[in-house]
Amino acid sequence: MLQYPNIDPVIFKIGPLSLHWYGLAYAAGFISAYFLAARRVKRLLPDWTDQDVSGLVMHLVAGVVLGARLGYVLFYDFSWFLSHPWDIVAVWKGGMSFHGGLIGVIVGVWIFARRAKKSFLRATDLIAPLAPIGLFCGRIANFINGELWGRATTAPWGMVFPGAGPLPRHPSQLYEALLEGVVLFTVLWTYSRKLRSPGKASGLFLVLYGCFRFSVEFVRQPDAQLGFIAFGWLTMGQILCLPMILLGGYLLATAHRRAG
């Protein structure tokens, strides 16, 4: 069994102001997305300007934050927020959904593409290889916060998380950081080094993330307020991954037909 490091979720505090690892993770993801997108458009999308990249990232930030919070409210704890509507804006209490954030990003990028007169799929292809950086940072922050832990295990790398009982558990946050962050970034960044048919990078992101997340959910503890949704093993995270995989497969197939 490995020892959980017990890192303080608050990096530092000055008076009433405090910097949390979770907030730093979001900032690191967005800043990295901006600089990597600006670097890539110079080589692959010469018709894009620095203002286009800035506009895309601003819409990305709004889509992630609003979508992730509303997605958590709708998908994971709707009954609670129905009776406590004021908590919807209390993001400092936790509760952000990747799948909600993804929907928010899609909407935000669609609005940007219409305003800037850019191809929607070119825009999503641009940000698809950058998303894993934010996912990696977010999962590491989940681990530091001691949240979203895995199921009980006898594996030698199991950890006892504060608030999760006495049993060692899978550090599923680290599994997701590796798959959704390191592996996904490596594959997508390499794949998108040359300009592909519109929708290919986006489709590959959806398929790979969906498969990685679906797999890790088998060792991740289901949300306490939901438990298993069906069959004694299917979780909400897995259900939400299925349309991702199907949509990703559709984008890959249609992009392949256009190129063919």
Image (tube, rainbow, N blue to C red):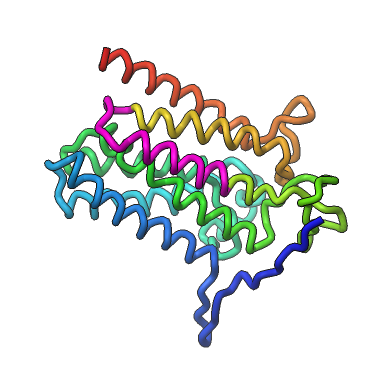
Q: Where residue 27 appears, x then y in whole percent?
A: 42, 62
Residue drawn at (55%, 62%), measured in percent from left and top? 90
Q: Where residue 143 appears, x then y in whole percent?
A: 64, 58
In the rendered structure, does residue 97 fall within the stretch colored magenta?
no
In the rendered structure, does residue 190 fall within the stretch colored magenta?
yes
Residue drawn at (26%, 17%), measured in percent from left and top? 259
Report the predominant secondary structure element of the magenta stretch. helix
Residue drawn at (80%, 58%), measured in percent from left and top? 160
Question: Picture quarter containing residue 129?
Answer: top left
259 shown above or below 207: above
Image quadrant for the C terminus? top left
Q: Is residue 195 left or right of residue 97?
A: left
- What is the tally of numbered marks visible in this picture? 0
Residue drawn at (38%, 46%), measured in percent from left and top? 130
Camera-nearest residue between 193 and 219: 193
Q: What stretch is highlighted in magenta?
A: 177-199
